[in-house]
Image (tube, rainbow, N blue to C red):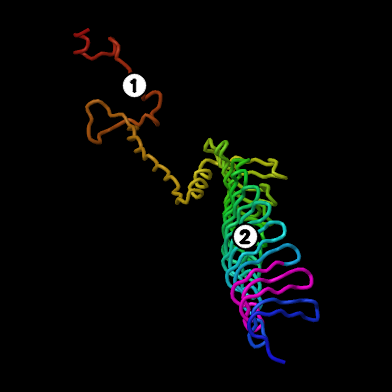
Amino acid sequence: MALLNGFGKEEYPNNDRYEGSFKRGARHGGGTYYHYDGSRYEGAFEEGMMEGTGKYFNSDNEIYEGEWHNSQRHGHGQFTYHDGTIYDGKWQADLRHGQGLMRYADGGVFSGNWANDRRHGQGQMTFADGGQYQGSWAEDQRHGYGSLKLQNASTYDGEFFNDIPEGKGTLYDADERSQYAGEFRAGLRSGEGKCEYLKNNDKFVGQWLMGARAQGLMFCASGEVERVGYLNDKLIRREKLPIQEQERLKCEANGEVYVAPVAPEPVVVPPPEPVPDTLEEPGTRGGSKATDVRTASKSSLKQISRVPSKQEAGPSEAIKA
């Protein structure tokens, strides 16, 4: 039996059939292969395999148009899914692999890297509700560092793990009007973190638990610093701190070095000069006879202060009198 060469038709035991070019009995060149389930391939063949460019229609009304290698999608191609989702990008061994653009039926769009049919590497996703994510992906999930913007204008920049915020990051909450920087667990503020409330300019620094404040310091807009405690984000403890401690904490919060104020040196007052304890007798100087006021008898003091009478006066005193 001669081998087919050129255009021909061939039917197979499983009810598949082929119409197109042959070379030495093998499908080679342009042709159409019809599967028994209704799917078909239109395009190039090489030695019986789909090779080059071609268009494939499957039984689910899905269409692939692009490059082929060894009867697999390989190279650049576009696949239209039954729900209207369209992928346009790179393929490898029949899987989405490399740079590609996916337009989802709900309006979402992903542009980025694919590996083994999954979003993997760097990519940007615009969600149907208007939210956006740009960053790292792993196994079709947000994983690594990325930036997320929600529909209500809230934003998160930081680490992701298995599609949710986990690790260190910053969150701007548009509804709460707050800016948080710190740790996240299971998508919630949890661990060490600081949050500034833009409504009143207060700032909380301390421990968080499952999205709620637990304990720490409150830097009030008035300038005061308080030690506070919360239960289910409700204030249950409030402690005012000494002024010097407040100043130290404010410096540390601003990344500054706190220098304690220097106490003023004490003023030294010279002792008063001693008051003499002795009385000198009239006419005596420089250590002559003196009377000690503390030890003098009453009679001695009377003698010192007594004025003679006329009868006691001497001759000369009597003449003067």
Secondary structure type for disc 2: strand
- Quadrant hosting residue 191: bottom right
Q: Quick one: quadrant of the C terminus?
A: top left
Question: Which amino acid lies under the numbered mark 1 shown in the image of this protein?
Answer: Gln
Along the viewing direction, whichever of 237 and 178 lies nearer the viewer: 178
Query: Residue 141, position in %: x, y?
Result: 66, 62
For residue 210, side relative to residue 268 (left or right): right
Query: Residue 165, position in %: x, y?
Result: 64, 56
Q: Residues within 10 Å of mark 1 (few under 14, many from 20)?
A: few
- Quadrant hosting residue 91: bottom right
Q: Main secondary structure of the magenta part?
A: strand
For residue 63, side relative to residue 59 (left or right): left
For residue 97, side relative to residue 254 (left or right): right
For residue 107, side relative to residue 122 (left or right): right
Tell me the tag on residue 102. 2
Kindly tell me whether residue 241 is visible in this rendering.
no
- Quadrant hosting residue 118: bottom right
Mark 1, residue position: 303
Query: Residue 232, position in %: x, y?
Result: 72, 45
Q: Earlier in the sequence, mark 1 or mark 2?
A: 2
Along the viewing direction, whichever of 72 and 180 lies nearer the viewer: 72
Identified at 52% across, 47% down, the residue is 249
Query: Which residues, given as a range, are shown in magenta?
Result: 28-57
- Which dot, 1 or 2, sits closer to the camera? 2
Above or below for 7 versus 190: below
Identified at 73% across, 80% down, the residue is 10
Secondary structure type for disc 1: helix
